[in-house]
Image (spheres, grey):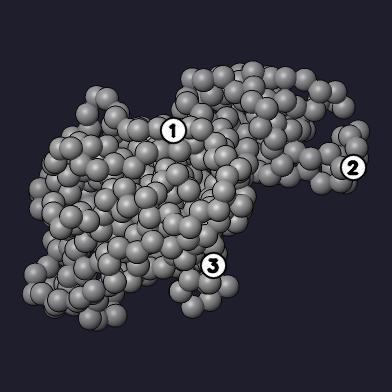
Amino acid sequence: MNYFLLPRIALAFVLTASAGAASARDQKKAPAPEKRPSVKVDGAPLDAKGGVVLSYADVVEPVQRAVVSIYSSKKVREQLQANPLFRQLFPNLSERERTEEGLGSGVIVSSDGYILTNNHVVEGADELKVLLSDGREFVATIVGTDPKTDVAVIRVEAEKLPVVTLADSDKIRVGDVVFAVGNPLGVGQTVTMGIVSAKGRSVGILGDIGGYEDFIQTDAAINMGNSGGALVDARGRLVGVNSAILSPSRGNIGIGFAIPINLAASIMNSLVETGTVARGYLGVTTEVITPDVAEQLGLPKDTRGVVIADIIPDTAADKAGLRRTDVVVSIDDHAVTTVEELRFLIAQMTPGSIARLAVLRDGRSQVVNVTLDQVTERPDDLLTGVTVKALTADDRRRLSIDARVTGLLITEVAGESPYRSQLAASAVIMEINRAPVTDLPSAKEALLLQPNRALLAIYFRGAVRFVVIAP
């Protein structure tokens, strides 16, 4: 079985003679307003009681008006010559550029034009067009993206748009009826029905980029093109944003995944208000406690939780007095049984807020209150704390970079970045895993070729050198 993020459907390929591909960062972005979108929220749980329902048409029709199709286009550069020396000496002869078009879905959440979708629907796009169910078409701008949750927010300049009401996704239950709404395979807007099959799924789809997963699993039919579409409950309230499927054939087999709306809305508000996503940071390394480790720590063998293996100095955990071998069993009364659960719960909390950790120390239960640090992840980060941009003519003149050098310019390496001893600002990443990179999407794709270790060709101060990193 294979997991697939639901990509934009490739609709057409047009070869052009131009050179230099653009990225999503080059296109015009909507300025981040000071206040979050005004959305409708209904947090009441579904009532399991009721008579036989013969039609959900009245529930589905309003949702259909708020679900849109998103058409994207982006320029993709192709290598015609495999010899790296030839590519450096004759860049114009070794590359050609084509335009790739794709299709995804989105959900209007505010009447003034804010739309929730997936990061992978808009990533790398030079142009975005949004088609409403009533036939109106708008050019959209990217407000912000968060690859680590696969959430993106775009906006169209319009007023009084139809919207969907947000539910409280924490209150959904396995067995609740749900509907998936989107534009699968480009056939037109489609509604499929199923149930919530599972909650809190972490399946490793975003693992290569250190992502955060807490998926709703559903058997409502989801196919390519449903990316970014709505998953709604039997009242027509948005409970999730469709994102991925598990399939041996890239087609629906009844195992689909949606981002819970509570998580997606939180990311949206952060992107709209600040342009970034600020996540809580604890400052520990942990592992799941095993029966053998539990016995050595004087705990029952059936103890469930995660044990702290190390504490990073001067972090929130260090300042709060957490210790190595402390076993974390819950955070704010949410049980913690896996490393992923601890990481996700902390990341969802606001930096500066207090996390209440229930821990087992020396066989005794106690509570440790931790004031969380902040980890701010920016949309232009290629690696943790490493910000890049497409190399421009002005950059070449300013930094005296050889005209034959192409790639991504490192604009900043943060002090807390684990790569600060290997990478430096003003260096140019020419290749990753022997693949040329010219924009952020191609660089991230190249990193996935060898997710555990990556070989970077770096141009810095007039020389090319190779650096091996662990992404």
Residue 232 spot, x, y in % from top left: 44, 49
Residue 197 spot, x, y in % from top left: 60, 56
Instruction: Name the foreground residue: 396 vs 231.
Output: 231
Where 175 falls versus 88 (above or below)? above
Q: Secondary structure at mark 3?
A: loop
Answer with left or right where residue 167 lies relative to residue 162.
right
Q: Is residue 284 visible?
A: yes
Crowding near the residue tagged with mark 1, few <14, some 14–19, many ≥20 C-alpha atoms within 10 Å: few
Q: Residue at x 37, y 50 (%)?
A: 58
Pick whichever of labels 3 and 1 is earlier in the sequence: 1
Q: Viewer-nearest of labels 3 and 2?
A: 3
Three-letter residue code for mark 3: Gly
Crowding near the residue tagged with mark 3, few <14, some 14–19, many ≥20 C-alpha atoms within 10 Å: some
- Quarter of the figure that contains the N terminus: bottom right
Where 332 falls versus 228 (above or below)? above
Q: Residue at x 8, y 75 (%)?
A: 17
**Circle 2 sits on which residue?**
301
Three-letter residue code for mark 1: Asp
Q: Secondary structure at mark 2?
A: loop
Q: Are marks 1 and 2 in contact (CB under 8 Å)?
A: no
Quadrant in the picture for residue 426: top left
Three-letter residue code for mark 2: Lys
Answer with left or right where residue 8 lies relative to residue 209.
left
Instruction: Name the foreground residue: 66 vs 245.
Output: 66
Q: Residue at x 57, y 48 (%)?
A: 51
**Circle 3 sits on which residue?**
254
Q: Is residue 275 visible?
A: no
Pick whichever of labels 3 and 2 is earlier in the sequence: 3
Quadrant in the picture for residue 99: bottom left
Answer with left or right where residue 280 lies relative to residue 305.
left
Q: Which numbered circle lies on residue 42?
A: 1
